[in-house]
Amino acid sequence: MNMVKRNVLFSILAMLCFFWLSQAQAAVAYAPATITSPTNGSTFTSTSVTFNWSSRVGASEYFLYLGTSLGTNNIYGQSQATRTSVSIGGLPNNGSKIYVRLFSKFNTVWYYLDYSYTAKTATATPTLNSPSNNQANVPLNNLSFTWSAITNANYRIVISEKQDFSGFAENTLSCDTTCVTMATTATSISRITPSVSKTSITAGNFANFWWKAGTYYWRVRANTTTGGTSNWSNYRSFTTGSAIKRAIVNSAIGAAGASPLSVIGSPWLTDMSGGDGVRIRNAITTFKTWVDSRTGGGGYASWSVKRLAASTTVRTTMATNLSPSYNSSDSSQLIEQIRLTYAGTVPDTDDKTLASLQIRAQCKEFADRTVALGGGTKSSYTTNGVNIKDVNPGMYAFKSTTHAAIITAVKWDNTGAISNIRLAESNWGTGWSNPGGQVPWLRVVTTTREIPLTGYTAVKTD
């Protein structure tokens, strides 16, 4: 009996051992995959995370859950087939707990392991302080931008001529000619005095950008190592220059190309009572007298293309009329302009003749009349101008007493000083290289010449 009991007991023990061993082997064989990165319990630094896990021999499929509570998949839940990595975007950025469950399938049975992480905390968006929204008459010589501080952040600011900031490229963090951008930390930032806090930028740091009289839009975003890049702030707009300066610049730019400047009644028609006007009128009178002497006094109506081969004597006399600025070659050009003009309808008055010849305003005439159209105050030539840091679009640019133009844009260097100016000007066209030397029927108004401020005096217009 005792022997029988002993054999039964041994049999039971043997069966228990076999069961335990088989279960242990199964547990080893079907151990689920483990997430190798990111580290369990860590905090995400982005709203997009790549999960990597180990491969398991015999696993036919992996399945990944992400949820806001243990075992849920309200954030993400998809089969991964047999791959061992997946990138998931659109994760929360509110610092909440994110629970992850990785399933491994062996035969028809799913095994899993649980993990937990902390979502990134979004970097707060800066609040813009100054300039205030729609602020007008913001002076370029004291332009500065301020916004609220974000803990341990650095910042990027963009200032644009376009409301949609389409000139800014996110992939390269760069601008085209319509905007300017800059990253800033706690370094000294100032146009004049390097003593500005990290939440403020002054204009001297935006060197090599053409500043105009007009409307600009600006926005800022922050970046931290823990929260990443914030959203852009709401944009604000501001306007540089006074209303008069903006009107002067718009008037000057509107005259570009002389379309034409010499139309009867045009504010840019040259003054026919003095200077070029008198000389050209005298030259035309000389030519008209010569024509009349050969047509029986037929006047303008008898001026035909066939009768415009003026004699050398007449050309010389016309050159004398045009002096001291012009020569016989210039008088020949004037005669050619007359010939071209009279290929069509012959003007019946001297003023219409001058207008049809496109006798355009000289540089100072053009500048003065542009200032007057903008409601500004005209100025005589002077070398007593504004301080170099106070130069603004809409001012005169005088080169001694030989040339006058309107400043339409300014550019400063890394020291915050105005280095270059862009001009709207008459007398800058074909055949002209020095102020005062261009024949008036070849004058054009240009708005693209960019030159160093050196040698020019900027003078107020309002």
Image (tube, grey):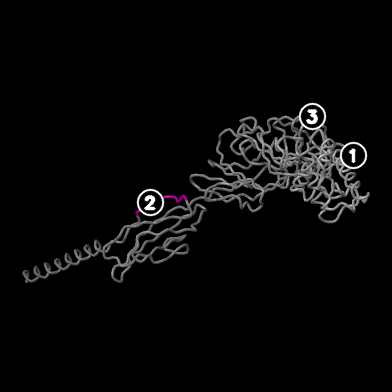
Location of residue 62 in the rendering, given as x and y in whole percent from the top left corner: 35, 64
Residue at 77% across, 33% down? 459
Residues at marks 3 and 1, CA–CA distance in whole angstroms: 24 Å
Give the amino acid at mark 2. Answer: Thr
Examine the rendered structure and indicate whether residue 106 appears above or below residue 208: below
Looking at the rendered structure, the secondary structure element under dot 1 is loop
Instruction: Find the magenta span and give its range.
Output: 36-45
Q: Residues within 10 Å of mark 1 (few under 14, many from 20)?
A: few
- Tell which circle, 3 or 1, labels the residue nearer the N-terminal end: 1
Please tell me which residue lies in front, 92 or 263. 263
- Magenta segment main secondary structure: loop
Q: Residues within 10 Å of mark 3 (few under 14, many from 20)?
A: some
Please state, as top left, top right, bottom left or bottom right, where the N terminus lies in the image: bottom left
Q: Is residue 458 magenta?
A: no
Q: Which residue is mark 2?
A: 39
- Which mark, residue 273? 1
